Image (cartoon, rainbow, N blue to C red):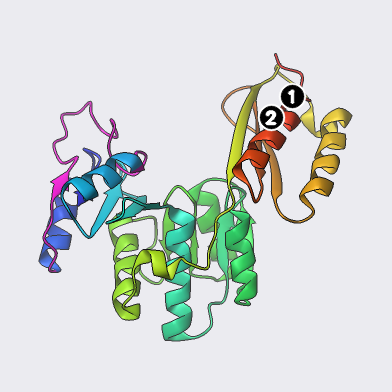
Amino acid sequence: VVDCAHGAAYQVAPDVFHELGADVVAIGAAPNGFNINDGVGAVHGEHLAHAVQANEADLGIALDGDADRVVIADADGRTYNGDELLYVIVRDRIANGGRVAGVVGTLMTNLAFEKRLADLSVPFERAKVGDRYVLELLERKGWQLGGEGSGHLLCLDKHTTGDGIVSSLQVLAAMRRAGKSLAELTADLKLLPQTLVNVRVRNGFEWKSYAPLHDEVRAIERELAGGGRILIRASGTEPVLRVMVEAEEADLAHALAHRLASTVPAA
C-alpha cells in the first residue's frame, strides 16, 4: 500500500514502487486542492495500518503532503516512526559498509534510540526540532545520516534533502539485504513512551528562570534515575510551553509530564 496523502507524490510514488517490482495499492492519490493530508498520509499512521490489513498487503508506505516524510506499517498493523526507520538504516549501513561516522536526531528523538546508538559505538547529537536544523548539523559534522521521529529522514549520500520515497527505499533495501521484517530489525529498539503537554503561558513568561519549574525538573530526574528524559521548550509560534517526559512506563511518563506541567503558571 502506498499512501500519497493526496499530495505531491500522488503520481510518482506508486509508479516508483511498481517499477521496482511491487504490487501497489495506491491510496491518498486523488488530490483536489483541498484534501492534502486530510485523514491520510504519514501524519495519520493508523489509516495506513488499517489499509495494509484491509488489502492483505505485506507493507504500507505513507508519505506526507510534500513527500519529504515517511512512516511504514507492516502486515500486523504496526506502524514504524522515523526513529525506528532511521535505526534500521543505521544498522544496515553498519552491517554492509562498516562504521557509521555519526547520526543526528533532534531534541524529540527518543532516548532509547540514543542509547542503542551508544551500544553500537555510533556518535549521536541532537539538533533543534526541524529538518533544516538536522541538515545543518549533519553538514557541520560531516555525517550522512539523521532524521526526526516524524519520518523526515536524511541520507546525504543518497539525496540532499528530505525525500520520503528515497528514504523508504533505504528501509526496503535494508530489509531485503537482511532478509528480515521490520519487527525483527527493530526488536532490540524499545522506544520509551513519551507524553507531551502543551501549557499556554502569558506572553513574556521567563520559564528558564522560573525556580519552581526547575526544582520539579530536578526532583523528577532523580525519580527517573536515568530511565527517562525531560524536555521543556517554548513554541516558536505561540505563547505555549511544551513539556515532554519519557519514561519506561507510559503511565509514569503521563503522570510525571502532567505533574511537571502543573508547576507552570497558566495564562
Can the viewer see residue 9?
A: no
Q: Does the magenta run of residues contain 42?
A: yes
Q: Secondary structure at mark 1?
A: loop
Q: Secondary structure at mark 2?
A: helix
Q: Is residue 179 left or right of residue 95?
A: left
The residue indicated by pointer 1 is 262
* Amino acid on which disc 1 is placed: Ser
Query: Badges 2 and 1: C-beta atoms under 8 Å apart?
Result: yes
Q: Nearer the viewer, residue 126 or 143?
A: 126
Residue at the image point whose x is 50% and y is 50% from the top:
132
Rendering coords of residue 231 (x, y %): 69, 43
Q: Is residue 48 above or below residue 144?
A: above
Q: Nearer the viewer, residue 167 or 195?
A: 195
Rendering coords of residue 137 (x, y %): 58, 60
What is the spatial separation of the Cα atoms under label 2 and label 1, in whole angstroms? Answer: 6 Å
The residue indicated by pointer 2 is 258
Q: Specify start and end residues of the magenta stretch as a single range.
A: 21-45
* Amino acid on which disc 2 is placed: His
Residue at the image point whose x is 25% and y is 53% from the top:
60
